[in-house]
């Protein structure tokens, strides 16, 4: 995928540099850019769950990223000096859930910051153009910016980074959609 936009809040850019998290921040970008996603070029024809699975698979290829499957921040990596943890980066991947779950991601980051589990939180969302091809109700970068700057304004004071990702190109077949609520029979 491509990274099309990065938006910094709450001194996060300076904190990445000051806390020595530049290497982790670049590693995150490498994970995202090494994840290949091609979409069928028609509105809402591509399953977003597959995109999430591919990103998660990318994290698993790198050492020391910890996945949290039940609530909380999705991925955390700790920067160590000898045996001491000196800083932590937390990443929320918001590509396959309903757009209103963005509020939960911000709350997870806020709680992680307050509990000293992370020092900086990052939320990865589809770029506006990419979101057009994914299943409906997925957040996009414009929505994420609006949410941070207008709906939940105190989030601007948290060291949060928003990253917009874009697909690599088109495909003749859509990304498979997840089947949920199948019912009985």
Image (tube, rainbow, N blue to C red):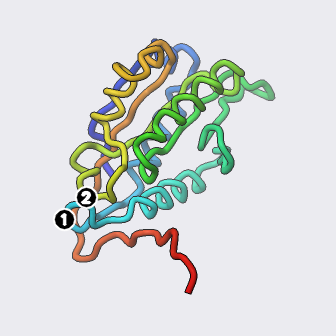
Residue 163 in percent (x, y) is at 38, 35
Q: Is residue 87 left or right of residue 8?
A: right
- In the rendered image, the quadrant that contains the C terminus is bottom right
Residue drawn 27% across and 57% down?
168
Q: Secondary structure at mark 1?
A: loop
Q: Residues within 10 Å of mark 1 (few under 14, many from 20)?
A: some
The Cα–Cα distance between marks 2 and 1, rounded to whole angstroms, is 7 Å
Residue 61 vertical position relative to residue 7 in the rendered view, above or below? below
Residue drawn 67% across and 32% down?
78
Residue drawn 53% across and 35% down?
105
Q: Which of the labelled discs sits on residue 164, or is there none?
A: none
Query: In the depicted view, which residue is nearer to us: 122 or 87?
Result: 122
Residue 35 vertical position relative to residue 147 in the rendered view, above or below? below
Residue 98 in percent (x, y) is at 43, 48
Q: Is residue 107 left or right of residue 176?
A: right
Compare marks 2 and 1 and give the one earlier in the sequence: 1
Name the image quarter holding residue 87.
top right
Residue drawn 56% across and 51% down?
59
Toward the bottom, the furthest residue is: 185
Q: Residues within 10 Å of mark 2 (few under 14, many from 20)?
A: many
Name the image quarter holding residue 134.
bottom left
Residue 1 in percent (x, y) is at 33, 52
Residue hosting label 2 = 133
Residue hosting label 1 = 41
Query: Are discs 2 and 1 less than 8 Å apart at CB?
Result: yes
Residue 95 in percent (x, y) is at 42, 49
Q: Secondary structure at mark 2?
A: helix
């Amino acid at each position: 995928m491509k990274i099309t936009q990065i938006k910094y809040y709450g001194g996060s850019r300076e904190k990445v540099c000051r806390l020595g998290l530049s290497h982790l921040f670049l590693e995150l970008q490498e994970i995202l850019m090494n994840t290949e996603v091609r979409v069928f070029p028609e509105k809402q024809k591509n399953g977003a769950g597959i995109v999430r699975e591919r990103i998660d698979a990318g994290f698993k290829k790198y050492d020391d990223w910890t996945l949290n499957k039940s609530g909380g921040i999705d991925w955390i990596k700790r920067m160590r000096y000898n045996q001491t943890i000196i800083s932590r980066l937390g990443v929320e991947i918001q590509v396959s859930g309903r757009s209103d779950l963005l509020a939960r991601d911000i709350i997870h980051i806020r709680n992680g910051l307050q509990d000293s589990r992370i020092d900086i939180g990052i939320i990865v969302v589809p770029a506006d153009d990419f979101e057009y091809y994914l299943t409906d109700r997925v957040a996009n970068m414009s929505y994420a910016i609006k949410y941070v700057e207008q709906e939940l304004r105190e989030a601007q004071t948290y060291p949060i980074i928003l990253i917009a990702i874009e697909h690599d190109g088109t495909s003749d077949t859509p990304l498979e959609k997840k089947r949920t609520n199948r019912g009985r029979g």
